[in-house]
Image (cartoon, rainbow, N blue to C red):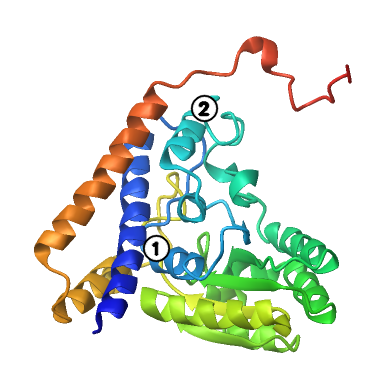
Amino acid sequence: MSAAETKKGADLLKQMVRVRLLEEKCVELYSAAKIRGFMHVYIGEEAVAAGVTSALDSEDAVVATYREHGHALLKGVSARAILAEMYGFVEGCCRGRGGSMHLFDRATHFYGGNAIVAGGLPMAVGLALGASMTARRQVTVCFFGEGAVAEGEFHEALNLAALWQLPVLFCCENNLYAMGTALVRSESQTNIALKAAAYEIPAWTVDGMDALAVAEAARRAVDAIRSGGGPHFLELRTYRFRAHSMYDPERYRDKSEVATWMERDPIDILRTRLSEGGRFSDDDWSAMHAEVTAEIEDAVAFAEGGSPEPVADLTRFVYSEVPR
């Protein structure tokens, strides 16, 4: 492995560790009742967000689902703003009004955090249409789960994107379960990339547990889109190591299946590959882990010191303000 490849791999590894440690901290804080409401963590799927966002520019847009903490973090939303939002404090990216499932940050072009299954797909097409009409080089990336392919918005969005040749990258995070329903029990055709290809969209399947493979596929797709190649589609086959949500008793999948997938932890896979290349040592790993740990602990302290929305402001952003 060359020095350049090692650097690229180390960058991806660090981003995955940032997401993993943030999510593990969220689980801890949720268990302590510091975070309330519904929460869905991304543990196990980090290679997808890390690989795809590595191919984006700062002006590119990202639309995500309710399992979006990692996407927001890697798009540039600070860990401080994310945790403060989940605490429900005004220092959060949405002033504490969105919570875990509705992170949003216009400054970094992160447009949710969408709780409705497939709800982000039409939004992504709209953003891409706007970029196309104004001749901007912006690429819009839309993350969604394989459960979204059962919704009408999936087919409508892909059809319009292909018809109008819009600059959008559809990223299906296929973790095999739509909440508690296995893909094989809900879809007669389980090859999601094949469904996308039916709309004349270039589509291919990627190992979503391999961050380097995801990064390479995303770069190939983004470059093609930015060059005027129209929409592209990636089916990223991955797996969530934890239940659908913090409320989920997880009675729908066998523990041995989860254990088998956990043997393909994307962080372990990339760390091993870097170590075998001889350019990434245990000391490098320790330093990286310590740096990320400090970032997350700083975010927790920031959130702990947050403040709730003043009662006098509770109707702000609900009703239009009178011009002065």
Which of the image's four quarters has the C terminus? top right
Q: Give the residue type at disc 1.
A: Glu
Image coords of residue 101 (percent x, y): 56, 44
Q: In which quarter of the image is residue 285?
A: bottom left
User: Distance of mark 2 from mark 1, alpha carbons?
Assistant: 26 Å
Using the image as rendered, state which of residue 180 and residue 129 is in the foreground.
129
Q: Quadrant of residue 211?
A: bottom left
In the rendered view, would you say 117 is above or below 91?
below
**Left or right: 307 as drawn, with respect to 294:** right
Q: Give the residue type at disc 2.
A: Glu
Q: Label 2: which residue? A: 91
Residue at left offset 68%, top offset 16%: 313
SS class of the residue under badge 1?
A: helix
In the rendered view, would you say 218 is above or below 15?
below
**Left or right: 43 as drawn, with respect to 96:** left
Q: Label 1: which residue? A: 46
User: In this rendering, which labeled residue sits more in front, label 2 or label 1?
Assistant: 2
Q: Which of marks 2 and 1 is nearer the N terminus?
A: 1
Q: Is residue 33 visible?
A: no
Residue at left offset 17%, top offset 54%: 287
**Left or right: 160 as drawn, with respect to 309:** right
**Left or right: 154 as drawn, with respect to 322:** left
